[in-house]
Image (cartoon, rainbow, N blue to C red):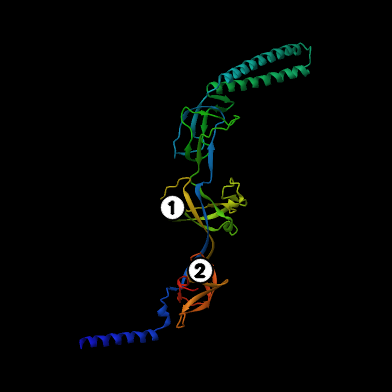
Amino acid sequence: MKKRWIAIATLSAIAALGIYAVKAPSSDKHHFTMLAAKNATIEKQAIAVGQIMPAQAVKIKSQIEGIVDKIYVNLGDKVEAGSPVIKLRPNPTPQDLTRVNADLLKSKADLESAKVKLANLQRLAAQKIIPANFDAYIQAQAAVKSKTAELKQKQQESDLMSKGESNAGSTKLTSIIYAPINGTVLDVKVDVGEPITSTESNQAATEIMTMADMNNIIFKGSVSEHDAAQLTEGMPVELTLAPYPDLKIAGKLTKVAVQSEKLNDDSNNNQQAQSFDNGFAVEVSDIKFPKDITLRSGFTATAHITLKKATDVMTVPERALYFKGNDPFVLIADDSTKGYKEIPVKLGLSDGINVEVLSGIEPKQSIIDASMVEGL
């Protein structure tokens, strides 16, 4: 008897469930993943990857050759323009010393000869044998002045080569190199005792150190040609630095290159293997760096350049869209056999994740996640 009552109860429950399933809305049977339209801000952005660096950086080289004798600054030092940064010790070759000394002796001899010639002509002019404007007399006076200047030059060269300093009128010639700008020492590329090749040499001049104004930092990077076509100077930029990934730093796009740079290596002769994507250099300045962070030249950075922006507009996720050809639709749940109906919509700005809906649905309306619907 007890078993019969259990069987009757079970059959009644199954029948009740069947009646509910028939009467329940068809949308519940499909178990669609639902999304909601909501108001949000949509931004279309171009991405540039690059580095932050000083707007002005100077590579210091020497105009004279020698050996590094003293280095007055260290990495990271802030230096004022005109301050000594390095001192060189002359290191002439025996041939150079021989040449300079020979030139000096020759200049002295030439000056003595010119003076003797002038003295002879002066005596003739004093005796009225020749007039004061006699051509040879005028030339002799000029020759003495010329040979005097030449001797002085050779003496300065000899002093610089042997002692490392000399004088040229009120100007002191020295082997000390001074800072050309106010800035920070970014790199010292030589050590005491190393030889220095000058800018006057036929060889490449030695780069002694690099200085830069760290109060004026810019971003330099590149964007693809697809984004470059939409860029104009003055667009707002949001920078992210690799050491500070949570900081969003505002800046302004100030330069877009006219000439492209190949992003890919052209050394491969296989044309089919080469990519034709071109990169265009961009610069961002007027960057509002927080005062409590440490900046170093060369930090990797990513620039998000705002191309277009729509504020407080109705949006839906991109995955909610269903396309027939180029026409976009959204799916709204109903009691039909499929469980939904297709509603055409007009779209606006998209950031690749969410898209602006201009018309077709109501604010906060529930829509079906089209990416999860089978058979579309």
Q: Nearer the viewer, residue 195 or 87?
A: 195
Query: Counting other residues with Cα less than 10 Å from the Cα at mark 1, is it few (<14), some (14-19), or many (20 or more)?
Result: few
Indicate the position of residue 243 as horizontal and vertical percent values. 42, 50
Mark 1 lies on residue: 290
Q: Is residue 89 visible?
A: yes
Above or below, comparing residue 293 to residue 208 in the picture:
below
Query: Counting other residues with Cα less than 10 Å from the Cα at mark 2, is it few (<14), some (14-19), or many (20 or more)?
Result: many
Q: Amino acid at mark 1?
A: Pro
Task: Give the Cα separation between the discs numbered 1 and 2.
Answer: 33 Å
Helix, strand or loop at label 1? It is loop
| Residue displayed at 62% across by 23% down | 153
| Residue displayed at 78% across by 19% down | 135
Mark 2 lies on residue: 355
| Residue displayed at 38% across by 84% down | 21
Q: Amino acid at mark 2?
A: Val
Above or below, comparing residue 186 to residue 307 in the picture:
above
Above or below, comparing residue 131 to residue 263 in the picture:
above
In the picture, the quarter occupied by the N terminus is: bottom left
Indicate the position of residue 89 as horizontal and vertical percent values. 50, 25
Instruction: Give the quarter of the image for residue 155.
Output: top right
Indicate the position of residue 205 as horizontal and vertical percent values. 56, 32
Q: Which is closer to the viewer, label 1 or label 2?
A: 2
Across the whole image, how many numbered discs are drawn on residues?
A: 2
Q: Are marks 1 and 2 in contact (CB under 8 Å)?
A: no
Above or below, comparing residue 303 to residue 149 in the picture:
below
Helix, strand or loop at label 2? It is strand
Q: Is residue 232 visible?
A: no
Q: Nearer the viewer, residue 215 or 12?
A: 12
**Mark positioned earlier in the residue sequence (1 or 2):** 1
Query: Residue extending furthest left?
Result: 1
The circle drawn on residue 246 is: none
